[in-house]
Image: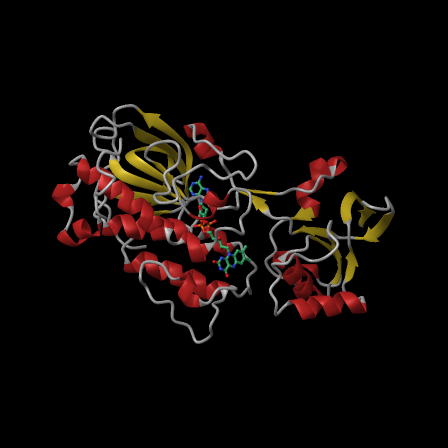
Amino acid sequence: MAESAAPAGGARSDPLDVVIAGAGPCGLATAVAVKEHGLRFQILDRGCVTHSLTRYPYYMTFFSTAERLEIGDVPFTIPEAKPTRREALAYYRRVALHHGIAVRQHEAVVGIEREPGTGGAGADGFRLRTEGRGGAAAIWTRAVVVATGGLGEPNRLDIPEVRDEYDRRVVHYYTEPYAYFDQDVVVVGGGNSAVEAALDLHRNGVRVRMVHFGTKLDRGVKPWVRPDIDNRIATGEILMHWRSRVAGLGRGTAAIKDHETGAHIEAPCDTVLAMTGWRPNRALLTALGADFDAETGVPLHDPATMETTVPGAYVAGVLAAGFDANKIFIENGRRHGALIAADIARRASYNGLISERMSPAATARIPSASGKVSRPT
Ligand SMILES: Cc1cc2nc3c(=O)[nH]c(=O)nc-3n(C[C@H](O)[C@H](O)[C@H](O)COP(=O)(O)OP(=O)(O)OC[C@H]3O[C@@H](n4cnc5c(N)ncnc54)[C@H](O)[C@@H]3O)c2cc1C
């Protein structure tokens, strides 16, 4: 990893300008933007850089073309239109190196508290509590960006009688097919992840049946994958149970229940692959007192700045989409960082907190003050 480009700081008496929790593509894009504004910052990830991508299927190809995944003005040049997971991992690592973003890896933000009066110019600041390989630590900062992504908790299947052995029988991450050869796998879900996993398993010697609560596959299934899955289901190579759920697990079997007719079948099943999506972890923002839309789970925020209802606390990336992770992805979430950085820099410069260390180029990046000058900090 590159030498830290962020100046020292982070003590109570010398708070940073901003700390970013999460080094996914959107957190990284935010780090680049705050650095370009001359802000003193730190970025942490509970895993490695773009940890979430390491958990995607190993051989996946992104649906976006490479240039739509670019951040920090670093060209993403590959021979094909759409990058693989490995190319994306290499690319984002390169961005971090290119911009000298030293991510504090394997260090989770476990709590954020407001610290009255520590933010400069009379504003509140924040104290972040972290836990990593080196133990527990605290960082003080004037602003905080929560960019912890959408993969907080999997949407677990409701199978009460197997609660204790759930994790051994039900898998929520699909990486590759080889561990399942010559076995029976029940794939739950009707979206891209379920369809692609089912096809990959089928092509690698696994007996696959899909279980989906709907009557058709999700509209978002990639159009070029659609004929393949439709034909595999039509020929019975992949068995499909529509309007159904996994209602129980027996010894080497799964009980599949048709929720319209109430009919049950016991199907052979070694593993249930639950491609049922994920929910963001909202604990950091909730504990801070941020407000959420009850129905959508969206943390309430100003779309022009990404600031939440807690002054100085921002949200970036897919976390801003609430329960619907399909609304924000890298293509659009990568733009949040520039909005956030401009707002923090604008506020800090009005308060005389950073002007002395801002380069002319960084100062020029601060948008016009019109309409914003009197904004409270
Ligand atoms: C199979 C698959 C294919 C996809 N294909 C595309 C595509 O083609 N195009 C596209 O635009 N999007 C695609 N997406 C969606 C895209 O990957 C996500 O929208 C994107 O990763 C969101 O970026 P993010 O930075 O908001 O969050 P994430 O990438 O989830 O990053 C969040 C980071 O925060 C870290 N973190 C979490 N909690 C803490 C904590 N408490 N403290 C510190 N760090 C923490 C995590 O370790 C993680 O590294 C795909 C998703 C999947 C699953």
Identify the residue shown where x is 13% and y is 52%. 360
Instruction: State left or right for residue 14 relative to residue 328.
Output: left
Residue 129 placement, left or right of 33: right
Task: Specify the color scheme.
Answer: secondary structure
70 and 90: which is toward the camera: 70
Identify the image quadrant of residue 361: bottom left
Q: Position of residue 114 (x, y in %)?
A: 34, 27
Q: Is 96 placed above or below 108 here? A: below
Vertical side of 92 occupied by 282: above or below: above
Q: Is residue 251 visible?
A: no
Question: Toward the viewer: 330 or 141?
Answer: 330
Give the quarter of the figure containing the N terminus.
bottom left
Give the farthest residue toward the bottom: 79
Q: Position of residue 79 (x, y in %)?
A: 43, 76
Image coords of residue 89 (percent x, y): 44, 60
User: Could you tell me which quadrant the C terminus lies in?
Assistant: top left
Residue drawn at x 47%, y 74% as measured from the top left: 80
Q: Is residue 299 visible?
A: yes
- Percent position (x, y) of residue 27? 38, 48
Give the side of residue 253 with respect to residue 11, left or right. Answer: right
Determine the image quadrant of residue 160. top right
Question: Viewed as shown, does residue 281 lie left or right of 5?
Answer: right
Q: Count all numbered tags in the image, as a single digit.
A: 0
Q: Residue furthest top?
A: 116
